[in-house]
Amino acid sequence: MHRRTALKLAASAILAGALCTGAASAEDVIKIGASAAKTGPLAGGSTVSHWPNIQLWVHNVNEKGGIQVGDKKMKVELVEYDDQTSGATAVKNIQRLATVDKVDFIIPPYGTGLVIATAPIFAKYGYPMVAVTAISDKVDELAAKWPNSFWTLGTSTAFAEAVAETLTKLRDKGDIGNKVAVVNVADAFGIELANAGKPALEKAGFEIVYDTSYPLGTQDLAPVINGAKAANPDAFVAFSYPPDTFALTGQAQISDLDVKAFYVGVATSFPAYAGKFGKAAEGVLGAGGVNPDTPEMQAYIAKHTEVTGQAPDYWASAVMYSSLQVLEQAIEAAGSLDKAEVIKAMTDGSFDTVMGTMTFDKNVNRKFWTIGQWQDGVYYGVGSTGLEGAKEPVIKTGWN
């Protein structure tokens, strides 16, 4: 469960370094701690969006000689744990990283619940916490409560309202009608998004003709899709977790759900989604997105694929990598490993990332992608809170 990833220096390089400058000492290394799911329900997402980006960042930092800290460059060493998708284990792991391993910095866990569960530990020991896979309308409240925390991915309301805005665009062009089916997984994530999304749809003048939820872990979603089909909607919207996203899409394909707009998410942006559904994925809308055409994103995608052996997803992966770039640049700006100085650098700084320039307004990133769509085999951002490069949404034309 515990694996220390030592710096990958060849023996010859170690010898050469020892002869020329002396062997690297503990003081020459930045210890980075990480705890997230490698097993349990969240492992499917974390092994796509979380862990590979840590691997890539460690590789890239060490490949270029390390992070500039004052007058010297320091390579990074990773200490990592599996939280087993357990809040109790996540808290225990972060506590151990802080007090036993005594790492210099800690990468937060994967998933809103685990991020929030461990936030008090980060605050207790004064560690900066750049949260990625955490979506909540309470980010401003959380940032005020824990000034060492920074929030990057967005709010539930922004994601839910983006659905209404995108459907409005399609309706105003005459591409879709006015009837929408809305479903959600019945846990905090799905309920919060549905509670924000349904009023936004009604405010935009849509008629919700089908509205239901299903318990977390539901395997058979045929009744949900068949119920929606019976209501004859023009658009289908599901606030769903990765397994549900795949199951709902598969069932819609089987049942030939005839809608001009089909939204499911999260995990719609995973390459595995297009891999599983092929041409049937075309036109499917989902949470988040990127502009994959920028030179920075093209280079990131190529390097991610080269180093990790898998392509990144088109949303949280790039934000995750960006969060590590923020940490790296904040350390360099601080010129030391002093946690308070690094937190100050994050608060005041502006950071060049693969997603573009990232800054924090009261510890919250205000510019993020809210909705994307598969178009010609690529998942593009079609809506954001101020980022450039969004594609125009298009209608879905069948499942074949």
Image (cartoon, rainbow, N blue to C red):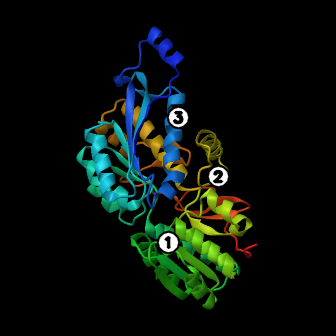
| Nearest the eye: 160 or 21 | 21
The residue singled out by tag 1 in the image is 160
Q: Is mark 3 on a helix, strand or loop?
A: helix
The residue singled out by tag 2 in the image is 292
Give residue 89's mark.
none
Q: Where is residue 238 in the image (x, y as percent from the top left)?
A: 54, 75
Q: Is residue 363 left or right of residue 387?
A: left
Q: Position of residue 14 (x, y in %)?
A: 48, 17
Residue count near mark 1 (Cα–Cα under 10 Å), binned few <14, some 14–19, many ≥20? many
At label 2, which amino acid type do we have? Pro
Q: CA separation, marks 3 and 1?
A: 36 Å
Q: Which residue is drawn at 40% across and 21% down?
A: 71
Asked whether residue 388 appears in the rendered view, the answer is: yes
Q: Residue at x 33, y 44 (%)?
A: 128
Residue count near mark 3 (Cα–Cα under 10 Å), binned few <14, some 14–19, many ≥20? some
Name the mark nearer the viewer: 3 or 1: 3
The residue singled out by tag 3 in the image is 59
Q: Residue at x 42, y 69 (%)?
A: 189
Q: Position of residue 338 (x, y in %)?
A: 30, 34
At label 3, which amino acid type do we have? His
Q: Position of residue 176 (x, y in %)?
A: 68, 81
Q: In this view, does 371 lie to the left or right of 101?
A: right
Name the mark nearer the viewer: 3 or 2: 3
Q: Which residue lies furthest to the left in this view?
A: 124
At label 1, which amino acid type do we have? Ala
